[in-house]
Image (tube, rainbow, N blue to C red):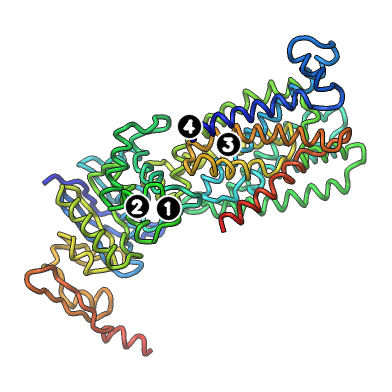
Amino acid sequence: MRRAADLILVVVLLLAAGATLVLGGPAASPREALAALSGGGAPEVRTIVFGLRLPRLALALVVGASLALAGAALQALLSNPLADPFLLGISGGGAAAATAAYVVLPAAALGVVPAAAMAGAAAATGLVWWLARGPLGPSPTRMILGGVAVNAATSAAILTMLALAPSPRLPGVIAVTMGSFASASAGQVGWLVPYVLVPAFVLLLHGRDLGLLATGEESAAALGVEVGMVRRRVFLAAAALCGGAVAFAGVIGFVGLVTPHLCRLVWGGSTRRLLPRAALAGAALTALGDLVARRALAPAELPVGVVTALLGVPFFVALLRRSA
Amino acid sequence: MTTLLHASSLSGGYGGEEVVRGVDLSVCEGECVAVLGPNGAGKSTLLRLLAGILPTSSGSVELWGKSLHSWRRREVACQVGFVPQIVNFAFPVTVTEVVQQGRAPHLGAWRPPSPHDHAAAAAALARVGLAGHGGAAIQHLSGGERQLVLLARTLASEPRLLLLDEPTAALDVRHQLEFADILRQLVSEGVGAVLVAHDWNFALRLAHRLVVLHHGRVWAAGQPDQILRPELFGEVFGVEVEVLQRDGGPLTVLPRRLARRREESLEN
């Protein structure tokens, strides 16, 4: 049963990737794109497919996998089904810093926006950790409450900057706050892929520990988990994945929250089993979300964060009703 | 008999406040030691200090003659099974998945469970009488069954020493007796146990020795017939009790009323 589900997941991922390359936009028809993919076709179509659509697909896959993996790890770490990079303020910190960079910096310096986003996510992570500290280390409840506070503060900051932003910068700000892969490039992918490998490895390494932490800190410690060390590593790794995602794609909600729950329905409650599958499912969902964002109102393009939220909310409500 | 655990002048607590002060305690193979005392006496804190879950502020704990500090957490978890009071299950998991968590200390980060790991988990589940419930969601079990699953999870790691924190607090009388039978059997097989309990009569069914804590210190310690006197209950709990023994069976504590000192303080 689970093996069949694994196979279906891989097939869905491949179909999502293929559909994105073939149906990615009006600039090249599906027939032309297929011809380019099979080695033929016009040079300009090959440029569209391999120079524009492929980097965009790769970025969507890496960002989706990062967000879903981080969400699954944070939910287990904090024993909380609602935990995700957004709730914990990490995405908000990255988005606020990127928005500030868009509003303040001269046009020639906008290349530093991703670095600003990562710095903002790191600052928010540090702030949440500091707010959550206590005599026995940071507690899951305080981390969530600290995250909610940081999230509220960053939202207020973003809205203020949106009100003050010069109009030529608004599209960039909207791309950051609502998510977009429109500016994807091979260079971004080449930077992001090696960057996510270390935090992803750390989370997969602690998959079994995370399954135990999902049952509470005392229970995990009793079964051999070095709680303080694992908590530090997992939180930093999840924040790093989220920071990388925000830096190149802005805030994409619901992927980190919903994907792990979707995977639990299919593969059960083992966190070790869940993590790699959540990453693949997050990659597939984000690629499909980006395809819908491009095609739904073509030639206009929706922010991908809007699409993932539109797809995620009904699913989340259904999940809520089911658990009741 | 081999000494499994020896604590000497053990102190510790939370955020600089000492809850347990200078406690001496040891457990041998095939011995059950019950730790009793009023609410806030430091019983659960003592158990966490013994398990190494909470750092000690002074004193020492030795497992098999070796300082607890020199053990890695996973090594401790392979030998010492700790049954906490409460375990939260935030996500749906099956009973089998919960019991298999008990094998985690033996597996490390990457190794998948071997046939022996599966067999140990299945045997632990059978031992608590829930062999047919492996596929059930833990959230669907009663409180008593859930507590038995937690015991099975601990037993799956094949521990030689058990630390149990009020394991029967939420159980009805039938589940209490089931739990007592399983524990008695384990102790007769050579497993050592430290049992924190509020129910004196449950503890007296199982314990070879009692340790009574009051304000974080050992107020009395020894075999039940040596230390069980009505005055002890007046001093520690502020209640009057009768200590009974019928037909050579275990001692039984029958609470009568609040002690005079307590009644007077209530009136004031």
Question: Viewed as shown, does residue A1 lie left or right of A147?
Answer: left
Q: Is residue B200 left or right of residue A289?
A: left
User: What residue is shown at x 24% (from left), y 63% (from top)?
Assistant: B177
Q: Is residue B84 above or below residue A94?
A: below
Q: Do the residues bearing badges 2 and 4 touch, measured as CB atoms within 8 Å?
A: no
User: Which chain letter goes with mark 2?
Assistant: B
Under tag 4, what secondary structure? helix
- Circle on res. B98: none
Which three-letter amino acid code belongs to the residue tagged 1? Answer: Ile
Q: Chain of mark 3?
A: A
Q: Which residue is mark 4?
A: A205
What whole-number distance in Å separates the C-alpha atoms at marks 1 and 2?
8 Å
Give how far across and how far down residue B113 sits, in percent. 36, 33
Expressed as whole percent of the image width and height from the top left, the position of residue B172 reads: 31, 67
Q: Secondary structure at mark 1?
A: helix
On residue B149, which mark appears? 2
The CA span between labels 3 and 2 is: 28 Å
Q: Marks 3 and 1: CB-CB under 8 Å? A: no
Q: Earlier in the sequence, mark 4 or mark 3?
A: 4
Question: What separation in Å lies between label 2 and label 4 (alpha carbons)?
Answer: 27 Å
Question: Residue tagged by mark 3?
Answer: A278
Check if mark 1's residue and mark 2's residue have beta carbons within 8 Å: yes
Label 2 near label 3: C-beta < 8 Å? no
In whole angstroms, how far apart are the C-alphas of marks 4 and 3? 15 Å
Query: Quadrant of the image for the C terminus of chain A?
Result: bottom right
**SS label for mark 2:** helix
Q: Which mark is on residue B138?
A: 1
Question: Badge 1 local density, few (<14 within 10 Å), some, or many (20+)?
Answer: many
State which tag comes first along the sequence, 1 or 2: 1
